[in-house]
Amino acid sequence: MPNYLAFASDNYAGICPEAWQAMAEANQGFARSYGDDPHTDRACALLRETFETDCQVFFVFNGTAANSLALSALCRSYHSIVCHEFAHTETDECGAPEFFSNGTKILLVPGAAGKLDLAAVEQVITRRNDIHYPKPKVLSLTQATELGTVYRPEEVAAAGELARKHGLRLHMDGARFANAVAALECHPADISWRAGVDVLCLGGAKNGMAVGEAVVFFNRDLAEEFDYRCKQAGQLASKMRFLAAPWIGMLQDGNWLKRAGHANDCAKSLAAQLQAMPGLEIMFPCQANSVFVTMPEQLLQQLRAIGWHFYSFIGAGGARLMCSWATEEADIKALVDDIRSIEGSELLSPP
């Protein structure tokens, strides 16, 4: 039977073996709580080795907490955050960034294929400087973007330069950062701190972990009392070793990039097969692990009637098909075969 959930979201996938094994190894005997344990120490050390810098690391339960707490650490209530109009910070955080920052305003900027138009960013930053306007303080990038595209190192660097020019901090929502690194085949530092990123919210759940994200402060001064923010927000895990240990399994031997690369390859294979089919159109470049495709409404309805699950993305339309570390060629074949079967049936034939 086809795996009808295979393309709904990379959140639907289970835990990859490396993360599972690391949790099992952490589940031996007793360990000190609240992060004062060897597993958390090792995970932090591996992140510093991975990024080749002495960053400050905090582990939280999910991406909403990571982004919201990181942004609140960079802002005061009268500041504003500049981000893309499709950014998760705007569309899917239920107001959490504003809540945790006591009212910081989010200013939206357009940009093709989910990437910020830096000219539009600068216009938003500079259009007013009076006391009646929420002062821009943070520029937020999403890597990979919500539309499945990636910022190249020089693009991140340009955003970092613009942010510094106007006295802004650069935040990166990296829920799918691993997919971006794998796609670009670059060093993680080249699209983070070397390009001017101050704080990265590094995704674990979408990369194959059960739960947990890492908030990585490359500018350690900005992490002052961040542990208190985590505690106040209910994000300080008492058994922190189980949030931290999976990072050990993922970062060792480059497993996080192997898993992300597999998801990316599956997305490219799916996109190529769909692109070749009449009546279907790939909406955005397939650069990470998502495929956005437009198809006739009747085809969408029939696929859902069969049992396939997928989302229509907020604001962009089309069907969003996500690949994960667990996606298999058999999943791709099953979906493509069903599309061909429906297209060849009377259901889509003209009256």
Image (tube, helix red, strand yellow):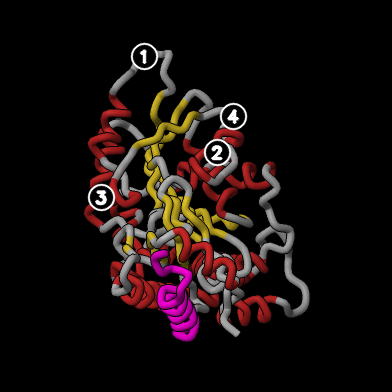
Examine the rendered structure and indicate whether residue 317 appears above or below residue 302: above
Q: Could you tell me which secondary element the residue under label 1 belongs to? A: loop
Q: Which residue is mark 1?
A: 130
The residues tagged by marks 1 and 3 sit, at their Cα atoms, a distance apart of 28 Å
Q: Residue at x 57, y 65 (%)?
A: 11
Q: Is residue 69 visible?
A: no
Foreground: 251 or 173? 173
Q: Give the residue at mark 3.
A: 157
Q: Distance from label 1 to label 2 (Cα)? A: 23 Å
Q: Amino acid at mark 3?
A: Ala
Residue annotated with mark 4: 102
Task: Indicate which disc, 1 or 2, sits on the residue closer to the N terminus.
Answer: 2
Q: Earlier in the sequence, mark 2 or mark 4?
A: 2
Q: Amino acid at mark 4?
A: Asn
Earlier residue among tags 3 and 2: 2
User: Which sits in the foreground, 87 or 275?
Assistant: 275
Callout 1 amino acid: Asp
Residue most toward the front? 351
Q: Disc 1 and disc 4: Cα gap in Å?
A: 21 Å
- Disc 4 is placed on an element classified as loop
Q: Quadrant of the C terminus?
A: bottom left
Q: Would you name the residue on which mark 2 appears?
A: 97
The x and y percentages for residue 31 are 73, 70
Secondary structure mostly seen in magenta is helix
Q: Residue 10 in the image: x percent, y percent? A: 52, 67
**Amino acid of disc 2:** Pro
| For residue 233, above or below residue 31 | above
Judge the density around disc 2: few (<14), some (14-19), many (≥20) Cα neighbours within 10 Å. many
Q: Write down the quadrant of residue 169 in the picture.
A: top left
* Front position in the image: 322 or 242: 322
Q: Earlier in the sequence, mark 1 or mark 3?
A: 1
